[in-house]
Amino acid sequence: MKYAIDRASWSPEDREEFEQMLAEICGRTTDSAERIDLAEALLNDAVQGQRFWARQVERACLRDGLGAEIRRYEDRNRVMFAHDGRVLSMPAKQARRVQVDDGRTVFQRELIELWPWAQIEDKRAEAIRARRTYDDKVAHYDRLLALRVLCPDSASPDEAARQLGIDLQTYLARPAEAA
C-alpha cells in the first residue's frame, strides 16, 4: 500500500515549492536517471532546510521503494501453470485487500491459492481493467503510427502532423474513423 502524501496539510507556499522542484527537474533533463539524481539532491536539500513537505515526500518515496523491494523479493517465488499451449510463470503470492479487526482495509500478499473465491474474482476484474488500459496505450501508439503511413518521409508524429498541416492533439482526440 502506498504511503499517502497529505498535500492538504501543506501551505500553498509548500505546494508551490514542491511543484517548482518538480518543474525544475523535468525542465533540466528527460533522462530518467538524471532526473532521479536531481530529485534526490533537491529533496535532500529541502529536508536539510527543514521544509515541512520534504519529510512527507521523503517518507512516501522511502516506503514505496521498500514496498517495491519486498514485492520483488516475494515475486521470486513462482508458480507454473499451463495456458494456450504454453507453460507460464506467475508470482505465487499476490496482493489482496483485507479488512482487519479495527475496520481498516489493508493489503496483504498471500498465496493466491488460499484466497476466497470472491477475492480471486476481484483480482480477475482488476486484471481486465489493467488490460483495457494496456489496450488503450496500444491504440494511442497505433494512432501515432498511422501518421507514418500518411507521411512516410517524416521522422516523428509531430513532424508528420506539421507536414500534413494538422494539429496533433486535435487529430488524436478525434475518433479514428474521422481522422
Image (tube, rainbow, N blue to C red):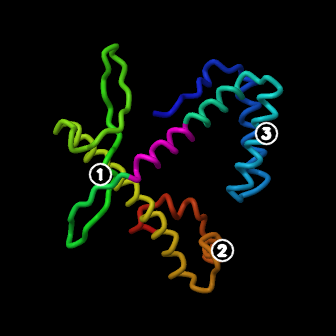
Find disc 3 in the rendering and name its residue: 42
Crowd around label 2: few <14 · some 14–19 · many ≥20 (10 Å): some
Q: Which amino acid does label 1 sit on?
A: Ile
Crowd around label 1: few <14 · some 14–19 · many ≥20 (10 Å): few
Q: Quadrant of residue 121?
A: top left
Looking at the image, tell me whether mark 2 or mark 1 is earlier in sequence order.
1
Looking at the image, tell me whether mark 3 or mark 1 is earlier in sequence order.
3
Q: How far apart are marks 2 and 1 (CA)?
A: 35 Å
Q: What residue type is labelled 2?
A: Glu
Find disc 2 in the rendering and name its residue: 159
Task: Establish if 62 lies above or below 102.
Answer: below
Q: In the rendered structure, does residue 71 fall within the stretch colored magenta?
A: yes
User: Which residue is pictured at 18% across the width and 36% down the height?
Assistant: 116
Q: In this view, does 179 lie to the left or right of 34?
A: left
Q: Distance between the residues labelled 3 and 2?
A: 35 Å
Which segment did they paint magenta? Answer: 64-76
Q: In this view, does 59 lie to the left or right of 133?
A: right
Could you say where residue 73 lies in the image, as x and y percent from the top left? 46, 47
